[in-house]
Amino acid sequence: MSLSLQSGGAASRALAPPSTARAIADQGNQMTTRPITTGTSVLGMKYRGGVMLAADTLVSYGSLAKYKNARRLLSINSRTLIGAGGEYSDLQSIADLLRGNALNDRCTADSLYEEDNNEECAGEVWSYLRAVMYQRRNRMNPLWNDVVVAGFRQNPDGTTTDSPFLGVVDKIGTAYEDDVLATGFGAYIALPLMREKYRPDMEEGEARALLEDCLRILFYRDCRALNRVQIAKVTMDGGVLVSEPYELDTYWDFKGFVTNKGEMGTDGGW
C-alpha cells in the first residue's frame, strides 16, 4: 500500500482497491506447513581446546538428492558457529537474522576497534534462538530446523572464558546442552557411537576422526546423507574456522553389503 498525504498534513496509508483486498483475503494466511528442501544430520562434540561440528552438504527435495553443495555449517560472528538440519530456506532465514544482530551490535558498539567489541557469545545466541523458535511455534508458523550452536561461554565483563559451549534448539523451542550432540537420523545412529568413544580430553585430531567415522556410517545407513562433508571448529585462539567441502573415502566390501539377505538369492534388497 502507498503512503498518501491527506489535507491538513496528516499522513495515512491509502486504501487498497477492492479487487486487491479480495485477492489478499482469498490467499489467506501463508505458512510453511511442512519442510520442502531439507538437510539431514549435524554432529557436534567438545574436545580439549574447542568445539567441533560436522555435517554433509546434501539438501534433498523429498527423496531426490537435489543440491549437493549446500553449506549447513555457518559462522555467525568471530566466536559463534551454528549448524542445522531441516528446511534449508529456514536455515538461511535464521542465519540472516543472527548475522543482522551481529552487525547491529558492531554498529552500535562504544568502540570501533574489533578487540573492544563485545560480540554475542554462543550461550547468548542459543538463548535467543530458543526464544525465537518458541515464539514462531506459538504463532503456528515454526522454523523447521534443529539448530546446533557451538562456541565459548562469556564472563560478566564480556570477555570469553575457556569453557566451551555446545547446545541445540529444535523447531518448538526445546533446548539443552551436552558434550556431544546430533540431530536428525544421527541422533539414532551416530550419537550412541559418539557417547561410547567420547573423552573430555580428546585432541582435535581424535575428535575429527570420530566425527568423520560417524558421517561415513550415516552415509552408509541414511538415504538422505552424502559423503561430501564439512568440518567446522571454534577455538579460543583461532576463532571460527569452517572447512571447504571434501569427500570421505568409503568402503563397500563389507560382507553384510554383498551377501544374500534371508537366503533368498537376491541382491540384498527387499
Image (cartoon, helix red, strand yellow):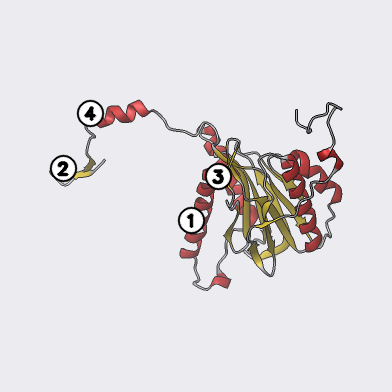
Q: Which residue is mark 2?
A: 6
Q: State the residue in front, 259 or 74.
A: 259
Q: Are marks 2 and 4 in contact (CB under 8 Å)?
A: no
Up-down: is 133 above or below 122? above
Q: Are marks 3 and 4 in contact (CB under 8 Å)?
A: no
Position in image of residue 188 (x %, y %) = 76, 38
Residue type indicated by callout 1: Gly
Q: Which mark is residue 100?
A: 1
Residue at point 60%, 64% (across, down): 78
Q: Are marks 1 and 3 in contact (CB under 8 Å)?
A: no
Q: Which residue is mark 3?
A: 88
Mark 3 residue element: helix
Residue at point 72%, 51% (across, down): 44
Q: Are marks 2 and 3 in contact (CB under 8 Å)?
A: no
Q: In 3D space, how far apart are the residues under numbered discs 1 and 4 (Cα atoms)?
A: 37 Å
Residue type indicated by callout 4: Pro
Q: In 3D space, how far apart are the residues under numbered discs 2 and 4 (Cα atoms)?
A: 20 Å
Which of the 4 image quadrants contains residue 203?
bottom right
Q: Residues within 10 Å of mark 3 (few under 14, many from 20)?
A: many
Compare marks 1 and 4 and give the one earlier in the sequence: 4
Position in image of residue 245 (x %, y %) = 64, 58
Position in image of residue 181 (x %, y %) = 73, 47
Q: State the residue in front, 112 or 77.
A: 77
